[in-house]
Image (spheres, coloured by chain):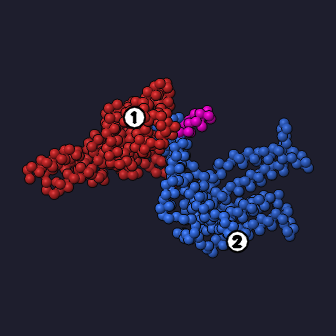
Chain colours: A red, B blue
Amino acid sequence: MISVKNLSYVYSPKTPFNTQALFGINVDINDGDFFGIIGNTGAGKSTLVSHFNALTRVQKNSGTVFVDDVDLSAKKLDLKKLRAKVGMVFQYPEYQLFDDTVEKDVMFGPKNLGLPVDEQRSRAKAAIELVGLDYAEIAGRSPFELSGGQKRRVALAGVLAMRPEILVLDEPTAGIDPIGKRKLMELICDIKKTCPTIIMISHNMDEIASYCNRIAVLDRGTVKGVFAPRELFGSRELLEKCGVELPLVTELAVGLADAGIDIDRSIIDQDELVCAILKAGKYA
Amino acid sequence: MRDMTIGQYYPASSPVHRADPRIKLVILVLYMVTVFFCDSFLSFGFMTFFVLVTVFMSRVPLLKVLKGLKFVLVIVLITTLLMMIFYTDVNAEPIAEWWIFRIYLNGVYAAVKLAWRLLLLILMPTVLTLTSTPTELCDGLESLLSPLKFIKFPVHELALIMSIALRLVPTLIEETDKIINAQKARGAAFESKNPFKKIKAMIPVLIPLFVSSFRRADDLADAMDSRCYRGAKGRTRMNKLKLRVGDVVALLGWCAITVCVLFLKYNWFGWGFIAAWGL
C-alpha cells in the first residue's frame, strides 16, 4: 500500500532553473492494484514514482509518502529494505546491464541486499525463468550479445531477483514491436502472481485500458483524478477534461456508435467488442 | 551531477554575449599575456577594474562569475600559503617567525600578487564560457586556426570533434544520472567511505556508460553518413561569423590596456608617480 499525501516537488530549488514538477499530489495505491499512471510528457509521472523507492527524497514541508507503514519523508530510512520492497524498472532498462554474464548481472540486486551466494544464485535462476528465458542457455552468456527484447527481460529479471512486493514499471514496452509488446504485457501479468502490486507508467492507452484496474491521470504536476478504466474511457467529458486519447478498441466502438450502430461506447476489451459487433449485426 | 556549473553558459542579452567569438578568444589570449606582465598592485588593480567592467557589461550576476572560482579557490589558497612561508628575503628582517618558518613583508606582497594573478587568470575564461555557447567558441576557434589548413592541419575535423564532445557532455551527465538511479534501485550503494569500495561501486555505472557512448557514436556516424557528410570541403555555414565595429573597438581597447600595463611595468619615461606607487 502506497499512500501519497499532498506531495510537492521542486527541481533545483533556489536557483534560476527552479521548476516545480509536482503540486500537492494525493494518490492511494492499494495492495493488489494494477495501477496505471498516464499523462503527457512533463506531467510529473516519473518524478512521482521515483519517490516510491526514495530515489527522489521527499522535500521539506512538501507532503508525505507512506509505503505500508514506512514514512519516506523521515530523515533516516532503511534504503536497502525499501528498494528490495519497491522494485523499479526504468525506461529502456537494458541500458543498465553491466556484468560479464547474465547470471552475475541478475545477481547484482540480491548481492547488494547482502544475501548468501547460494540464495543470490537461486534467486537469479528463478527470476530469469520468471521472465521467460532459458536459464541453462542464457545464464553464462554476456548480456551485451543478446537481442534487444532479451536484454530487456534480463534487466527486468535483475529487479525481480530482489523479490519486490511492489513493482514500478516506467514505460515497459517502449521501443518494442507490437507482438513483443503483447508478450511482455502477458509476462507482466504472470509476474503479478508473485509481486501483487504493479504500478505502470505508459503512453499506450491500449495497454492501460486492458490491464490496469485503476488509472491516475496526471497533468502538469497535478492529479486530474483516479478512475476505473471504463469510467475514464467511457466518459467523453472526462476524456476531454483530462486530454486523454482513446484506446484503439474504444475508438472503434465510439466510431461505430456514431455511425448509428447500437454499441456501448465504453467498451475497452477486444473480445467484448467482437461480441457486441456480432450482436448488433444480428439485429440489424 | 546535474548541479555542475563549470563552463555553463549564462543566457543574457549583452554586448559581451553578442561579440564575435574570434575577437573574444583573441582578447582572452591578449589578456592572459598581459596578466603575466602585471607586477605591481597598481597594474593588478588596473586589470581588475577592466575585468569588472567586462563582467558588468556582460550582465552576468557577479556572484555567478565568482562561483566559477569556487573550484580553484583551494589551489589558490595553498599556493599563496606556500609562497608566504617559503619566501626568503635576505635584505630584510622577518615580520613574523615561528619554528622554522620566517615570514617577510615582501613575501606577503609576493603571495598576495600571486593569488591575485591566479584569480585574474581564471576569472576571464569563466566570463568567456559564461557569455559564449560552446558552438560559438568552436566556430571561433575553427576560424582562427584556419590558416593552419595550408600546412594540411585538419582544422575542421578538430573543431568538429570538439563541438561533438562539448555537445555530448550534458547528455552524458543525464545518462550517468539515469544509470546511477537504475543501479541504486537495485540496491547499489555509492555512499561508501572506503575509496576502493567506492571505485568498485562505480563499475556498474561506467560500463553501461561506455557501452552507450559507443552506441551514440555509431548512431551519430550513421546519421552524418546518411546526410552525406564529407567533411569541410564545400561546406557552408548556417551562422557566418561577422566582424562588427564594436568588436574591433573592444579589441583596440584591450590593446590599449595592454600598452598601459606595459607602461606601468617598464615606465619608459621615468614618471615619478609610477615609481612611487608601484609596489
- Above or below, B233 relative to A186: below
Secondary element at image label 2: helix
Mark 1 → mark 2, Cα distance in angstroms: 74 Å
Q: Tag on residue A134?
A: 1
Residue lying at 77% horizontally and 68% vertically, measured from the top left = B259
Q: Position of residue A144 (x, y in %)?
A: 48, 42
Q: Front-most of B221 and A221? A: B221
Q: Is residue A58 left or right of residue A231?
A: right
Q: Is residue A137 left or right of residue A216?
A: right
Q: Position of residue B5 (x, y in %)?
A: 58, 51
Secondary element at image label 1: loop
Residue lying at 34% horizontally and 31% vertically, measured from the top left = A194
Residue lying at 75% horizontally and 66% vertically, measured from the top left = B258
Residue lying at 40% horizontally and 47% vertically, measured from the top left = A44
Q: Identity of the amino acid at label 1? A: Asp
Q: Position of residue A96 (x, y in %)?
A: 48, 42
Q: Residues within 10 Å of mark 2 (few under 14, many from 20)?
A: few
The chain that hosts pointer 1 is A
Q: Is residue A97 magenta?
A: no
Residue B237 occupies which quadrant of the picture? bottom right
Please tell me whether mark 1 or mark 2 is closer to you in this view.
1
Q: Quadrant of the C terminus of chain B?
A: bottom right
Residue to which mark 2 is pinned: B252
Quick one: which residue is furthest to the right in this view? B91
The chain that hosts pointer 2 is B
Q: Position of residue B253 (x, y in %)?
A: 70, 70
Magenta stretch, residue numbers: B190-204
Is the residue at mark 1 from the same chain as the one at mark 2?
Answer: no
Q: Identity of the amino acid at label 2? A: Leu
- Above or below, A39 relative to B158: above
Q: Front-most of B236 and A215? A: B236
